[in-house]
């Protein structure tokens, strides 16, 4: 292999490695005569950063991209027991590609669900992040510099803890106020009970 050809090969490999959201990092699945490639728009995906669902549909019988599916396919993202419906839209720069934006706010595995009908093929598939498919969402702590900021999940935890502390302080303050009022009333009652009633007897008049 000549030096110029080797340089060209290395350049192409390097360019491919630098492309964001490379489809090789996504999950490939054939359903009927259609190939679905599914993953995050940007990989690796980090919590708290804008990202979203990336889908490419190809007709394997003709090796052509399948267009006009934005209103046919229904998309949903699932994390644990939480679900969010997504609005697919066609990618402006590539036929057969559809995206839907959202912000993943917690690190972990995400699942994308696609349902609908492409021609005569019924679609009801789930794609979950895995080492063999697309990446899970990662924490950005190790990459933060120079100041680390709290993730949305950590902020939520801090807020919840502060609210709990405030509620406890308010509850204890109310108890203290009630006890103080009871003590004041008891003191007033004791003070009244010690007073001697004034005599109401009329004076005796002695005649000489």
Image (cartoon, grey):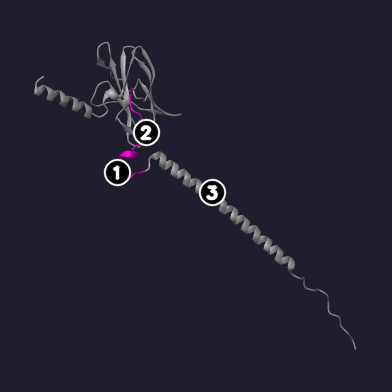
User: Looking at the picture, does residue 191 appear above or below residue 27?
Assistant: below
Decide which of 93, 12 is in the foreground and name it. Answer: 12
* Residue placed furthest toward the bottom: 208
CB within 8 Å, label 3 to label 1:
no
Residue beneath the point at 17% across and 25% down? 12
| x and y, in percent, of residue 8 in the image | 13, 24
Q: Quadrant of residue 71?
A: top left
- Mark number, residue 168: 3
Question: What's drawn in magenta, residue-wise?
Answer: 132-149
User: Looking at the picture, does residue 6 appear above or below residue 181?
Assistant: above
Q: Quadrant of the C terminus?
A: bottom right
Crowding at mark 2 (Cα within 10 Å: few <14, some 14-19, many 20+): many
In three-dimensional space, the C-alpha distance between marks 3 and 2, rounded to whole angstroms, equals 32 Å
In three-dimensional space, the C-alpha distance between marks 3 and 1, rounded to whole angstroms, equals 36 Å
| x and y, in percent, of residue 31 in the image | 34, 14
Q: Secondary structure at mark 1?
A: loop
Q: Which residue is mark 2?
A: 104
- Closer to the N terminus: mark 1 or mark 2? 2
Decide which of 140, 156 is in the foreground and name it. Answer: 140
Residue beneath the point at 29% across and 43% down? 145
Q: Quadrant of the N terminus?
A: top left
Q: Secondary structure at mark 3?
A: helix
- Closer to the N terminus: mark 3 or mark 1? 1
Decide which of 93, 166 is in the foreground and name it. Answer: 166
Q: Quadrant of residue 26?
A: top left
Residue beneath the point at 31% across and 12% down? 33
| x and y, in percent, of residue 120 in the image | 35, 11
Foreground mark, 3 or 1, reads 1
In three-dimensional space, the C-alpha distance between marks 1 and 2, rounded to whole angstroms, equals 21 Å
- Mark number, residue 197: none
Please state if 36 lies on the left or on the right of 200 as rendered: left
- Magenta: main secondary structure equals loop
């Amino acid at each position: 292999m000549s030096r110029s050809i080797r340089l060209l090969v290395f350049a192409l490999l390097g360019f491919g490695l630098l492309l964001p959201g490379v489809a090789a990092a996504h999950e490939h699945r054939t359903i009927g005569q259609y190939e679905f490639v599914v993953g995050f728009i940007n990989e690796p995906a980090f919590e708290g950063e804008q990202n979203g669902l990336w889908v490419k549909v190809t007709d394997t019988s003709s090796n052509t991209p399948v267009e006009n599916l934005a209103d046919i396919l229904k998309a949903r993202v699932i994390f644990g027991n939480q679900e969010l419906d997504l609005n697919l839209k066609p990618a402006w720069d590539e036929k057969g590609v559809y995206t839907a934006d959202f912000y993943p706010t917690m690190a972990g595995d995400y699942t994308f669900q696609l349902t609908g009908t492409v021609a005569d093929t019924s679609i009801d598939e789930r794609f979950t992040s895995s080492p063999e498919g697309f990446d899970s969402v990662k924490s950005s702590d190790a990459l933060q510099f120079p100041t680390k900021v709290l993730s949305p999940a950590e902020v939520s935890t801090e807020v919840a803890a502060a609210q709990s502390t405030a509620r406890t302080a308010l509850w204890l303050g109310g108890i203290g106020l009630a006890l103080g009022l009871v003590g004041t009333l008891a003191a007033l009652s004791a003070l009244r009970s010690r007073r001697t009633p004034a005599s109401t007897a009329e004076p005796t008049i002695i005649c000489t």
